[in-house]
Amino acid sequence: MNRIERLYALVEELRAAGRRGRTARQLAAHFEVSVRTIERDLSALGQAGVPLATKQGRGGGFTLDRSMSLPPLNFTPREAAAVAVALSRSEHVLFRKDARSALQKIMAAMPERELAEARTTADKVRLLVQPVPDPDAGVAETIWRAARDNHVLRIRYVDVGGVETVREVEPQYVVVGPNGSYLTAWCHLRADDRVFRMDRITAAERSPRLPRPRAVPEPVVDGHELRLPASALRPDATAAASTAGPEIPSANSDIGLSRTTGTLDATRRSGG
């Protein structure tokens, strides 16, 4: 997280804390920086006109003026429980901290009685999840930024047979599945679309090479339904846009991520 992102996140964290506020030490622990860095950030926010207030004494800290806070969002207990269930289904390393922060904001806006009912509701739900290997957090963040910003990556990859290669790839999508997370990308070494298990990518850095103009194919997963999280942010989008086509793919990775049979040679090695 760069400083600009952290400044925005600081405001949101103080907004979620409400009247309770946060101490500089709590904020430093939350953002994994030093107390001195947080104090400099808070000073910069104050100079920029963000209405911060301080509470003195035990339990004191920094608060955000109520004029900068939204009114209660009025989540019902069932809505809050549904969000908790949804967030608990995926503890992906890329979104784990953001998911928890989002839930904390919802909880901070709820009256105690409704929050207690939401907790009671959620306490009656159990989720069965399959443990999967997490990629390295730093590597995953580098991959994510490259996919988001359309940058070429140089990666070090260990395939299913233990063979390590260094290659340049053009990221397309981060795919989160039941057996782990994957990167789909155009591979310059193979001159084709490939799928990489993210926990097998041991190093990743941005390459100075420019990406080539291309049409990015949607990943197809044999036996799985593909869901597009962006559709949840566009309620008016058609339902057809949220699922993959019915093509049966040829396997190109551990879970069969690939292009369709008409465009992928089935004899290629799996795992990249």
Image (spheres, grey):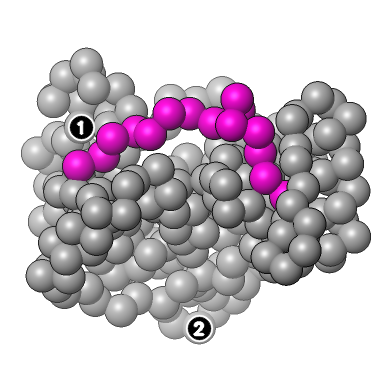
Locate residue 90: give its quadrant.
bottom left
> Is the C terminus in the top left, top right, bottom left or bottom right quadrant?
bottom left
Do residues under tags 2 and 1 come within 8 Å of each other at their CB atoms? no
Residue 211, position as x, y percentages in the image: 64, 32
Q: Can residue 229 be seen in this view?
A: yes
Identified at 84% across, 45% down, the residue is 41
Q: Is residue 129 left or right of residue 182?
A: left
Tell me the SS state at disc 2: loop
Identified at 34% across, 76% down, the residue is 132
Gap in angstroms between the C-alphas marked 2 and 1? 36 Å
- Give the labeled residue for mark 2: 162
Tell me the SS state at disc 1: helix
Task: Looking at the picture, tell me which residue is in the foreground, 206 or 60.
Answer: 60
Q: Which amino acid does label 1 sit on?
A: Ser
Q: Residue 103 got which mark?
A: none
Asked if 268 appears above or below 194 in the picture, the reply is below
Residue 228 forms part of the magenta stretch = no
Q: Give the total number of marks visible in the rendering.
A: 2
Q: Is residue 127 visible?
A: no
* Residue reaching furthest to the top: 236
Residue 156, position as x, y percentages in the image: 64, 67
Identified at 65% across, 33% down, the residue is 65
Query: Between disc 2 and disc 1, whose residue precedes?
Result: 2
Asked if 120 appears above or below 228 in the picture, the reply is below
Q: Which amino acid does label 2 sit on?
A: Gly
Task: State the predominant SS element of the stretch in magenta.
Answer: loop
Identified at 33% across, 28% down, the residue is 233
Q: Residue 242 got which mark?
A: 1
Residue 63 forms part of the magenta stretch = yes
Residue range (magenta):
62-76
Asked if 144 appears above or below 231 in the picture, the reply is below
